[in-house]
Amino acid sequence: MLVKVFGAAVQGINATLITIEVNCTKGIKFFLVGLPDASVKESHKRIVSAIQVSGFKYPRQQIVINMSPADIRKEGSAYDLPLAIGILATSETIMADKLPDYLIMGELSLDGNILPIKGALPIAIMAKENGFKGFILPTENAKEAAVVEGLEVYGVENIRQVVGFANNELELEKTTADIGQEFLQSQSNFEFDFSDVKGQENVKRALEVAAAGSHNIIMVGPPGAGKSMMAKRMPSILPPFSLEEALETTKIHSVAGKLEKGISLMSRRPFRSPHHTISNVAMVGGGADPQPGEISLAHNGVLFLDELPEFNRNVLEVMRQPLENRKITISRAKYSVEYPASFMMVSAMNPCPCGYYNHPDKACVCPGGAVQKYLNRISGPLLDRIDIHIEIVPVAFEKLSDSTPAERSAEISKRVVKARRIQAERFRKTPGIYCNAQMTSRMLLEYATPDAAGLQLLRTAMDRLSLSARAYDRILKVSRTIADLEASPHVLPVHLAEAINYRNLDREVWAG
């Protein structure tokens, strides 16, 4: 008897339909074909134990299983459940009438319980697109898959429930997700708020400008000045997720297995803060079993790189292309996958190895040339992709002891959202451009050309402050964002002056 069961393979952040054909004939051997990896081949032992412990009879016949299409490599243990159901169906332990209508995925433990899988959301989306009536998967992943409307989602805890459902002996409870309610409830629920930050008004302003235009920013200051504290509060002032952004971000975290338990849809922008010992593959993604890296996990959110010069130089250099293209393509001999990587990079660093260069109270003890050498750990091309450089000085005692509450993140966020709406309207006819940081040189001529006074100010600043030529476009982009925050249709000299002030690391005299 030949039975077909349907599963899925996840490639990148999308899923591909896998047809599992199971045939039982005379004999005693077990054959599994269709390019399975070692973990799929090992499923035979898990399936035998799960079936027997659950009280069912494993067929004493020759079993041949083909996983089609055969040119796609099948990886992981999520095929255990559909393989087991196919074997039970071909031996007529269960009826096969319902199987063509449902996509089935899940990992089996030896006692027949079903363990969670990765990539439930993209698999559910694919199941809906291919016309399946429902999706049977582990209970822990059911909320995640229930986001897809028009697809019946059933969470199961053990193989007996699936057998009972197939034989019409058990009614499974459909899993539903109230996306709108969950979305609204947690969108404004942030652990960190800018009202906790005392002083540092100029830095808060720079972070507001960065959030309004999705500009990359680097903060330079001594230890304890508040760099990490303010970076952690960046998500609280970014515009809320759109539903499309939330779905795309959730897909990435689903594939990586990073979704929190019981979460159906991510409602807050991600904040990723990898340690400086991270490897190239962990940062950009890939590996033998391709997974999204930190830059993709930060998609539509913030990637915070603390102690930037301490990162391996190669790790920083491989980020240059994703920063520009906002996607990363992982190409290997046997596969090629693409992950989105449209993130806002927030970075922080000390001004020198000892940390106290330009400190108002403590003297720098670094030897001559050490400051410039420390800065040179960050390449010019990478700095070229960072729009805003801001210096931070320690907060005075009077500010720290001041009990007056600072401005809340919600108030800052309102101004950021207004500026983003202006940009959305400006770029609505330009696909792929959503904010000022993404503008091309040609678009700068159209939207950010200064008047005569502004051009003169820019020329003077570049001469007197020894600004590099690469700073020109960045200054115009940031000044356009500052103008948007003030709802100004034109870039004025005052906007340019503020943007020029945010290019500290381009000054040749910065390191003395």
Image (spheres, rainbow, N blue to C red):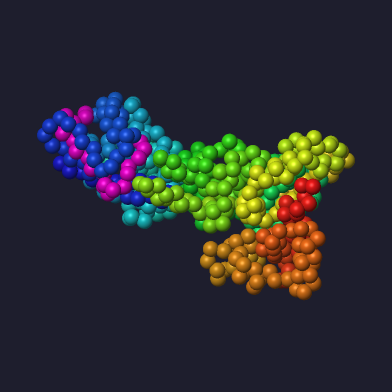
Is residue 304 something that shows in the picture? yes
| Residue furthest out toward the bottom | 452
Residue at 32%, 38% in the rendered image: 37
Is residue 265 something that shows in the picture? no
State the image coordinates of residue 320 (x, y, percent, origin top left): 57, 52
Q: Quadrant of residue 463?
A: bottom right
Residue at 40%, 47% in the rendered image: 332
State the image coordinates of residue 34 (x, y, percent, origin top left): 26, 43
111 and 219: which is toward the camera: 219
Q: Is residue 61 above or below residue 350?
A: above
| Residue furthest out toward the right | 398
The magenta stretch spans residue 70: yes
State the image coordinates of residue 198 (x, y, percent, origin top left): 80, 43
134 and 238: which is toward the camera: 238
261 and 347: which is toward the camera: 347
What is the count of numbered marks? 0
462 and 95: which is toward the camera: 462
> Which quadrant, please, contains the N terminus?
top left
State the image coordinates of residue 38 (x, y, percent, origin top left): 32, 34
Residue at 80%, 35% in the rendered image: 365
Q: Is residue 217 above or below residue 84?
A: below
The magenta stretch spans residue 104: no
Q: Which residues are magenta?
A: 57-77
Q: Is residue 80 left or right of residue 417?
A: left
| Residue furthest out toward the left | 26
Q: Quadrant of residue 142?
A: top left
| Residue furthest out toward the front | 368
Residue at 33%, 26% in the rendered image: 111
Chief secondary structure of the magenta portion: loop
